[in-house]
Amino acid sequence: MITIRHSIKTFFFISLATAFMLFIMVQRNNNKNRSVFSAALPAVITPMPTDIPKGPQISVMDSPEGSKTLTLENQERKELATYSLFVSTKHDEQRKQIFRKEEPSSQVLSIPFNTWSTDNVYVFLKEKTSSIDNYLVFQSSGNLFPNDLGYVSIQELFSKKVSGYTIEEVTGWAGPTSLIVNAKAVEGDNKVSFWFEVPSQSFIQLGTYFN
């Protein structure tokens, strides 16, 4: 009886061991045949820099008695600058745009110190280019000049009406309608001053040079 039980236990142990060995062998074969996959990394998107325009550069000049204000705004973007000119009054603070122009960045518009005429009817700007300085006269009301011109170019008129001289500088107002224009001779060292009369758009040569 003991021998039969021992034989049964031995057979059961051998069967269990054999099943365990077969299980291990099957698992090894499955691991060898299993394909290996690598997960693709997610694409990293680098944002491109955005060209954000800077805020406008602002220049301000009050009229001599302080009743009006001239404001010049310059908005630069890449190689261009957009200039906007405004006139406002102190009592209502409402701005009126009287001029807008797009210029290359190499050219600069600015407000001269003596920009207002003595009666506040006119203002003028200085336009600096790589070759010459120009001066632009406006009506502060925003009204147009004859021939529907928004402004008068002193340099353009001077080159047409005055021979033998070139403009050195427009210094400011000598009266309600007269700007002082300093000029030098094309040949020699002679210097003279002119009055530029805005209403008639004419030049009057003076006997005194205003240095």
Image (cartoon, rainbow, N blue to C red):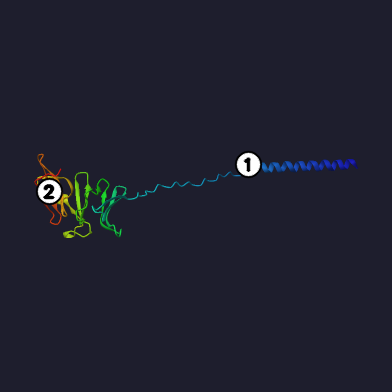
Left or right of 28? Residue 64 is: left
Question: Quarter of the image containing the N terminus?
Answer: top right
Q: Residue at x 75, y 43 (%)?
A: 19
**x then y, percent, for residue 16:** 77, 43
Q: CA distance from mark 2 to mark 1?
A: 102 Å
Left or right of 126? Residue 183 is: left
Q: Nearer the viewer, mark 2 or mark 1?
A: 2
**Along the line of sight, which residue is nearer the eye, 162 or 192?**
192
Element carrying mark 1 = helix
| 153 is higher (above) or lower (below) than 2 | below
Q: Residue at x 74, y 42 (%)?
A: 20
> Which residue in the protein does label 2 denote?
194
Residue 168 is labelled as: none
Residue 32 is labelled as: 1
Q: Residues within 10 Å of mark 2 (few under 14, many from 20)?
A: many
Q: Residue at x 15, y 48 (%)?
A: 180
Q: Amino acid at mark 2?
A: Phe
**x then y, percent, for residue 117:** 19, 53
Left or right of 136? Residue 164 is: left
Quick check: marks 2 and 1 in contact, CB under 8 Å?
Answer: no
Element carrying mark 2 = strand
Residue that lies at the very extreme toward the top in this rendered image: 189
Question: Quarter of the image containing the C terminus?
Answer: top left
Q: Amino acid at mark 1?
A: Lys
Q: Residues within 10 Å of mark 1 (few under 14, many from 20)?
A: few
Q: Earlier in the sequence, mark 2 or mark 1?
A: 1
Left or right of 192? Residue 77 is: right
**Along the line of sight, which residue is nearer the eye, 80 or 136?**
136
**x then y, percent, for residue 194:** 12, 48
Residue that lies at the very extreme toward the right in this rendered image: 1
